[in-house]
């Protein structure tokens, strides 16, 4: 694998190059003069203090070239959520927090090789849509954390690119693209948006309805910006306290978006209620069937399916057939005709 290292100090540059050069073909350059002129780069490792304006400006200057590299690993110094959000907004596909060991970095570089496909097989439109979607999600999370206005137009534009990618390359290629290049909450939101779009298209929904659906999907987990990362990205089962904290995210997202221009009541409803079930066993409002809108029912099925087939560092992606079987067994919770209509999306598209 050809790995290019970009760092904001010579010490970091030398340390990372030594860490990698026994197993990979390594090139490197300082961030201040970075140009990414090397051809055939498989992965970029970026080590920089994202609290410094000059580092962010330098990364933005090479972002156009950076996004064409398959794997983009950022190493961050700061412990807060904002540094992780900034890394994803600048184009990261993976984020590690310093101090990072050689074993951790090599494992992250190797991660995903089993499902790798070439750029031509996936299609550049899918990669660009995934990058736009991840950057939009990162921007939304940053806005919620800082109290700044959410970029609604940016989120809808990113959703439109995802819809174009699904129409052009199909759902299966979208799933491969996202699982290869993104992780955690960003992977989940991108998967949900793609699955929801394909479901809407399969149902023959009108263009305006598909637009509402992908907008709702892009916004649906914005409340997770307020959940601590050690809970949100915890490997394994959550305890009762952690589960209760996670279950605050729909209401938190609703509150963050309420009164925001460009966010319709239908989208707000979907953000707040995408974890509601027809039998009243969902949260946060324990709604029953007659109170759950169609767009919410579609988003809920898409959300559950996407969560099941996610690729996590601590477990492989569940086969689509098994994930669909779980949906079928959720009797009384999901609308049966919609679950049946979802079969083709889940298994064939």
Image (cartoon, rainbow, N blue to C red):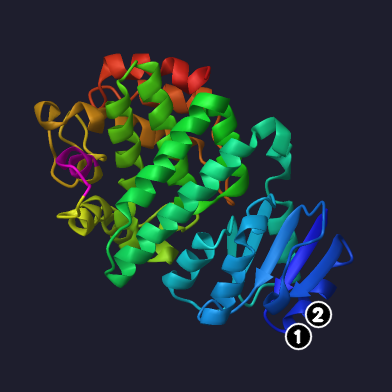
Nearest the camera: 177 or 341? 177
- Relative image position of residue 4 (x, y in whole percent): 77, 63
- Relative image position of residue 44 (x, y in whole percent): 71, 61
Residue at 47% from the left image edge and 37% from the top image edge: 162
Q: Judge left or right: residue 21 versus residue 329.
A: right
Q: Quadrant of residue 241?
A: bottom left
Nearest the camera: 110 or 84? 84
Q: Is residue 233 above or below residue 158?
A: below
Q: Please name the residue that numbered disc 2 is placed on.
A: 14
Badge 1 density bin: few <14, some 14–19, many ≥20, Cα 10 Å:
few
Q: Do we see residue 264 in this rendering?
A: yes
| Marking on residue 11 | 1
Q: Is residue 268 magenta?
A: yes
Q: Quadrant of residue 269?
A: top left
Q: Which segment is the magenta one?
A: 262-270
Residues under numbered marks 1 and 2 in contact, where contact means CB atoms less than 8 Å apart: yes
Badge 2 density bin: few <14, some 14–19, many ≥20, Cα 10 Å:
some
Q: Is residue 49 magenta?
A: no
Label 1, label 2: how far apart the Cα atoms are: 5 Å
Q: Judge left or right: residue 142 versus residue 168.
A: left
Dominant SS in magenta: helix
- Relative image position of residue 291 (x, y in whole percent): 10, 31
Instruction: Check the image and name the residue furthest to the left.
Output: 290
């Amino acid at each position: 694998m050809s790995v290019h290292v970009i760092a904001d100090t010579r010490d970091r540059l030398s340390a990372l190059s030594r860490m990698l050069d026994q197993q990979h073909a390594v090139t490197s350059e300082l961030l201040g003069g970075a140009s990414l002129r090397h051809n055939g780069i498989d992965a970029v490792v970026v080590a920089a203090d994202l609290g410094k304006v000059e580092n962010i400006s330098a990364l933005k200057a090479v972002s156009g070239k950076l996004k064409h590299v398959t794997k983009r690993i950022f190493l961050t110094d700061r412990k807060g959520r904002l540094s992780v959000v900034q890394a994803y907004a600048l184009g990261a596909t993976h984020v590690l927090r310093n101090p990072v060991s050689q074993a951790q970095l090599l494992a992250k570089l190797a991660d995903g090789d089993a499902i790798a496909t070439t750029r031509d097989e996936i299609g550049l439109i899918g990669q660009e849509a995934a990058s736009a979607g991840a950057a939009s999600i990162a921007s939304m999370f940053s806005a919620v954390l800082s109290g700044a206005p959410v970029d609604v137009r940016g989120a809808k534009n990113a959703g439109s690119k995802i819809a174009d990618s699904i129409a052009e390359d199909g759902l299966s290629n979208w799933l491969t693209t996202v699982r290869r290049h993104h992780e955690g909450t960003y992977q989940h939101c991108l998967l949900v948006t793609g699955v929801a779009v394909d479901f809407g298209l399969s149902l023959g929904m009108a263009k305006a309805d598909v637009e509402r659906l992908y907008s709702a999907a892009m916004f649906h987990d914005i409340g997770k910006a307020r959940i601590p990362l050690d809970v949100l990205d915890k490997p394994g089962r959550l305890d009762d306290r952690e589960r209760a904290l996670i279950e605050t995210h729909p209401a938190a997202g609703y509150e963050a978006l309420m009164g925001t221009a460009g966010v319709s009541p239908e989208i707000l409803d979907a953000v707040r209620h995408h974890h509601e079930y027809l039998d009243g066993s969902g949260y946060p409002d324990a709604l029953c069937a007659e109170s759950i809108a169609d767009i919410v029912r579609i988003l809920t099925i898409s959300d559950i399916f996407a969560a099941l087939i996610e690729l996590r560092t601590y477990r492989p992606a569940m086969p689509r057939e098994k994930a669909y079987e779980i949906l079928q067994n959720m009797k009384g919770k999901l609308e049966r005709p919609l679950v049946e209509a979802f079969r083709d999306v889940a298994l064939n598209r």
